[in-house]
Image: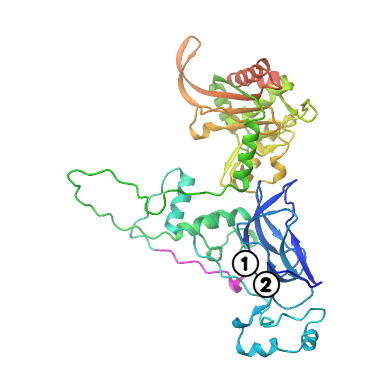
């Protein structure tokens, strides 16, 4: 690390990009020593325990030093980059790297150097002033083969491995890079996606507004780069074919650093599991009428353009159950030895994202109508999927829903979100034989699991809440009479 003594050098410190966050990891530097920066220019991308954020520099100048390499976790308030704001030239360059014509300039008297750069200290002996005001770092090549990247992203979207394109399909032409070597415009989640897939953003053709690269553009670039598959060769099967062996030649283990969202989630879950005494209760319920209501609401003009699914009615059912049993919406204040009953509901929805599990919440969900709740759910899901969820959106939750049914799981025993008293797990909705009106009929059935903090929610209260949710989902008309 270079020590800066000039009065014109400003140290830019790692800011608190969330609410009370203490550290952040430097994901990528967008500048290097010698680059000219302007007020508001993004100089790096960092990842906190909540989200990825791009950091703009608050002044004009020339980058003198990057104090930390990519991948380093830095405490908030620590200087991460030094910028010369005195209007001087670029960062010093070793004499061995200078052209011959630049050598005499390094040996110039101190008086001449001061005259050439007013207000600056003389450069170090053996160093000269760079001949260019900017020097961009060469971009890294793809970190994984494009074929593997394409397979991974298509599997994520479709749920299965993609089918190789026909050998006769013509290979698309590579898109042209942005003119003038300018840095492509893309939001942090898109840059993260491109980095994971090994896509160079300078080769991607943007289709977003103002030339912004979107996730779809990155996917298209991956798909366009997939080579045509060769014609399959049919070989005679051996007499006694041995099972395919897995190769462990390259590595026997893979170590993944625990940082960012994954680190924060792990710490929170350990703290919750060993602090709050968990109790989980289960109930299996016929939700056939709820599923019919979902289809009716989809055709309702009032819900046009809104996300309408079973989770919407489950969320509303839980809000009604909390209204009927308000003591379940509370938290435990260990320091004051008090139970804090909340007269509002910030409804958390657990969401699995590429960065890990996050739980953004809908503020004041108790006060929203069903269409308003549908709109809020849609915004929450879209924001989480795009990686744009802010730290503030993940704080202050009171009760959470986790939908494990989307993975085909019947139910589970969810762990409480720290500071909350209850969490409802929703299992897969399946067609099962069920006794209905004295006869066994195929009905839509699911299993609910409610975990709660037994310090402030006893078995009676927890059972009432779970029973109310089940009763509403079995007879949705109770939403009208109980709400």
Whether residue 299 is visible, yes or no, is no
**Is residue 79 positioned above or below 305 on the image?**
below
Colour scheme of this structure image?
A: rainbow
The structure residue drawn at horizontal position 60% and vertical position 86%, both measured from the top left corner, is 99
Q: Which of 98 and 110 lies nearest the eye of the viewer? A: 110
Q: Is residue 183 left or right of residue 176?
A: right
Quadrant where the N terminus lies? Answer: bottom right
Contact (CB < 8 A) between labels 2 and 1? no
Q: Which of 383 and 374 lies nearest the eye of the viewer? A: 383
Q: Nearer the viewer, mark 2 or mark 1?
A: 2
x then y, percent, for residue 286: 53, 19
x then y, percent, for residue 21: 72, 47
Q: Secondary structure at mark 2?
A: loop
**Is residue 479 positioned above or below 39 on the image?**
above
The structure residue drawn at horizontal position 63% and vertical position 74%, both measured from the top left corner, is 135
x then y, percent, for residue 46: 65, 55
Q: Which of 198 and 273 lies nearest the eye of the viewer? A: 273
Q: Check residue 127 in the rendering and tell me which mark sits there, or answer none.
A: none
**Is residue 305 positioned above or below 234 on the image?**
above
Q: Check residue 183 in the rendering and tell me which mark sits there, or answer none.
A: 1
Q: Is residue 433 left or right of residue 17?
A: left
x then y, percent, for residue 162: 41, 49
Label 1 crowd bin: few (<14), some (14–19), many (20+), radius 10 Å: few
Report how far apart the C-alphas of labels 2 and 1 lie in the structure.
13 Å
**Is residue 125 positioned above or below 388 on the image?**
below
For disc 2, the marked residue is 35
Residue range of the region highlighted in magenta in the rendering: 171-182
Quadrant where the C terminus lies? Answer: top right
């Amino acid at each position: 690390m270079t020590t800066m003594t000039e009065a014109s050098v400003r140290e830019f410190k790692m800011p608190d990009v969330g609410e009370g966050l203490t550290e952040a990891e430097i994901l990528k530097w967008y500048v290097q020593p010698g680059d000219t920066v302007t007020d508001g220019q993004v100089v790096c991308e960092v990842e906190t325990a909540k989200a990825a954020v791009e950091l703009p520099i608050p002044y004009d100048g020339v980058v003198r030093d990057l104090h930390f390499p990519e991948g380093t976790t830095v405490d908030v308030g620590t200087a991460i980059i030094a910028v010369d704001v005195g209007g001087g030239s670029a960062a010093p360059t070793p004499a061995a790297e200078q052209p011959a014509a630049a050598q005499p300039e390094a040996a110039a008297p101190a008086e001449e150097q001061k005259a050439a750069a007013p207000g600056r200290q003389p450069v170090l002996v053996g160093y000269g002033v760079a001949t260019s005001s900017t020097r961009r770092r060469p971009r890294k090549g793809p970190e994984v083969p494009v074929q593997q990247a394409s397979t991974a992203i298509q599997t994520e979207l479709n749920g299965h491995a993609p089918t190789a394109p026909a050998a006769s399909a013509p290979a698309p032409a590579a898109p042209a890079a942005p003119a003038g070597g300018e840095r492509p415009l893309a939001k942090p989640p898109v840059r993260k996606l491109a980095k994971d897939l090994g896509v160079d953003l300078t080769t991607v053709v943007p289709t977003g507004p103002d030339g912004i690269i979107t996730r779809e553009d990155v996917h298209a670039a991956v798909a366009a780069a997939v080579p045509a598959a060769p014609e399959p060769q049919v070989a005679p099967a051996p007499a006694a074919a041995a099972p395919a062996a897995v190769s462990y030649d390259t590595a026997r283990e893979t170590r993944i650093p625990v940082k960012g969202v994954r680190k924060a989630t792990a710490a929170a879950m350990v703290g919750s599991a060993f602090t709050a005494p968990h109790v989980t209760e289960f109930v299996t319920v016929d939700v056939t009428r709820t599923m019919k209501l979902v289809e009716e609401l989809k055709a309702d003009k009032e819900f046009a353009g809104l996300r309408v699914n079973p989770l919407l009615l489950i969320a509303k059912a839980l809000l009604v159950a909390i209204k009927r049993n308000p003591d379940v919406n509370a938290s435990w204040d260990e320091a004051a030895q008090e139970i804090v009953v909340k007269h509002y509901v910030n409804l958390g929805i657990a969401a699995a994202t590429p960065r890990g599990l996050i739980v953004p919440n809908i503020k004041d969900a108790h006060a929203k109508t069903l269409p308003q709740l549908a709109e809020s759910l849609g915004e929450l899901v879209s924001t989480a999927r795009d990686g744009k969820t802010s730290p503030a959106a993940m704080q202050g939750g009171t009760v959470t829903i986790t939908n494990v049914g989307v993975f085909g799981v019947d139910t589970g025993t969810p762990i409480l979100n720290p500071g909350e008293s209850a969490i409802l797990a929703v299992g897969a909705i399946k067609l099962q034989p069920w006794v209905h009106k004295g006869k066994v009929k195929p009905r839509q059935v699911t299993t609910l699991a409610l975990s709660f903090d037994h310090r402030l929610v006893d078995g009676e209260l927890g059972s009432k809440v779970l029973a109310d949710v089940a009763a509403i989902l079995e007879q949705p008309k109770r939403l009208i009479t109980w709400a």
